[in-house]
Amino acid sequence: MNFDVEYSEADPDGAMQRLVLPWLSKDHWSTKDLLGWIAGRGLPPVSGDEEPYVWILQGLPLGAQRHAAERELAGRLAASISELSVTAFSSQGDSKLSFGLLMTAASLGCPEELSAALRPLFERGVSGEWNGIPISDALVLAVAGNQLDNTLLIHWKRYLLGETTPVPGSPEDGLLGILLMPASAEARDRPSLEALQDALTCVVRWFDSAGEPDRVDRLRALSSKVEATYPGLKHWASFFAEVADRDRWPSWTRAALNGPAKDTQQKIFGRSAEKIYWPRYVEKRAE
Amino acid sequence: MPHRYEPSIATLLGSGEITERALARNVMHDHRVTPARAERFDQVAARPSTARELTDGLDSYYQRSVKTRRLPDFVMRRLNHENVVSDLPTGGGSPKREVYLARVLILNGLRLLFQYGHAKRILGFRGFSETSWSGITRWLDERLSLASMRGDFIERILNLIYLYSRHEPFQPSWCTTWTAISPFLPLRAPRWMQVLGLSTPSTTPIWLIVLKYQVREAGTLCRPTQLDCGRSYLHFPSPPAAPLYRGGHPVDLRYNPRSTDVIPEFIHKQIWHPLRHWTDAGSRCERVTLTSAGDLGAQRSAHHALLQTVYGPSVPLWMPACV
């Protein structure tokens, strides 16, 4: 398939599209190019603030062709992951490359192309870290985001229960896995609400028993993540209230479930008020 | 602190036309417009100093930088990163790619498209010469009244939209989530339109269809701003307390009884809609007779009150009045 560069020739914003899309349009390609880019080689001048995989994703189309391009890239990424030897994902491997490959997979979310390539790594485990982040964290994200059906439920439950697994994970990882796990192979646009309820209660109990000092903020962030992943699926505030009531969540959870963080108020009328109005309009200050 | 577009804003606020006051409020309080886009707007509108210059500027910006662009400003990260919903990794704040979106498309609004089909002698559109909404309705009646004919004709329309968009882009495409609109679909079609804030310029019967497709098919999904709809007074900015992932919130045109919750609203670039987007939505194709658009002041006040219910006391601090 031919993917069209959307930017004009002179537009510097289009540099990544001009690199990635002609390659994705080629019938004959090798994994060498993709592996090089993910390792940070052969890219046009781009900011070093982002990992190379982020720039590669920014080379994808912005409109109707995006999905086809994502699937094409995912297929080539799966081939790259499968082609690398086991040692590539071990402590002797190139951790930047391993991290980039897995984070690209996590960001693409194309289970038809990627789930089979990721599964062996998830069963065997990976090691190493990049910039202080364990490669296993990237693997959990990649596997969670590329599930074809609900067969990994047992793995996610092991995380929730704090059991030892080939790829280590926390109860929050278990919740993420269940959040992104389709209710079934036929209903991939929604999670298993029953499993999600149980997972949320497990995480709340884990925060509670561990005495997490920032548990309110973390639970609030998790509830936002649930809603962001499936906007409009349910009246999420009611869903959380029902689970909290059913499973008798501790009283501190109320603060996390009742409205936005306090700093939202500060953001509106505090120091950054100028950023809030377009264009810097202040009709009546709160005071 | 004076508004940078004073006295344009003050003139609009003092107008006897509620549509102008509504537009002024939208411009004043749309916190979602990024500094980079505000700068682009200033380039097009040349720092408007009168009400007419401001409204014309909104229209010019929309025409030049959004509606007719293959790469509209809203999908460009450099300009609009803060409103791109689909930029975050799945599970990290973006909707899951398999989540379904929904659009309601008013076929009567496609006059230029049908004229293009006629000019290009495309099968199904040859001979189209209607110019009025009622004429278009009669023309559509002949093609859509029999349920057995609909699939074929709607496929022709969807293909023509895509063909036309290659020459004449029409951005953005507005949508909500399927799960947000689906509770309303068993109700009569005028209610679908109300909840999405859709009205028409006439009370002539219209034809509309529903489309269902996945987030992954939409490309870059964004939260809309006033700049993405020109001088439309039917828009309403979402408050600062509304998280990005909820997008915007259309104004429910029914205000008595008032809605009890808001629904999300997103925009994306025009895409090709294959026929399955229509069949997956239940092959819904309805002929609808609408009453008048309703009382804009009451609609906006109800929406403003609903936002306070959902997002709390920060709403009136952000937007003290809505008309």
Image (cartoon, rainbow, N blue to C red):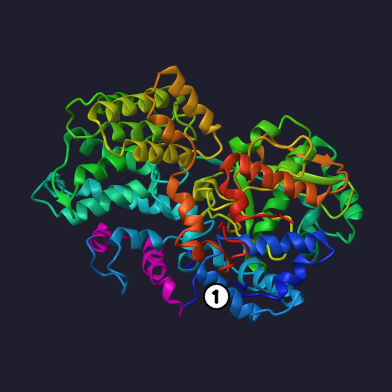
Quick one: label 1, few (<14), some, or many (20+) residues within 10 Å? Answer: some
Mark 1 chain? B
* B115 relative position to A29: left or right: right
Give the residue drawn at x 17%, y 32%: A166
| Quadrant in which the C terminus of chain A appears | bottom right
Label 1 belongs to which residue?
B39
What is the three-letter code of the residue carrying label 1? Glu
Q: Is residue B162 found inside the magenta-colored segment of the image?
A: no
> SS at mark 1?
helix
Q: Nearer the viewer, residue B260 or B292?
A: B260
Highlighted range, magenta? A10-38
Q: Residue at x 44, y 40 (%)?
A: A224
Question: Is residue A27 part of the magenta span, yes or no?
Answer: yes
- Residue B92 on image: x %, y %: 38, 45
Kindly tell me whether residue B217 is visible in this rendering.
yes
Residue A215 falls left or right of residue B70: left
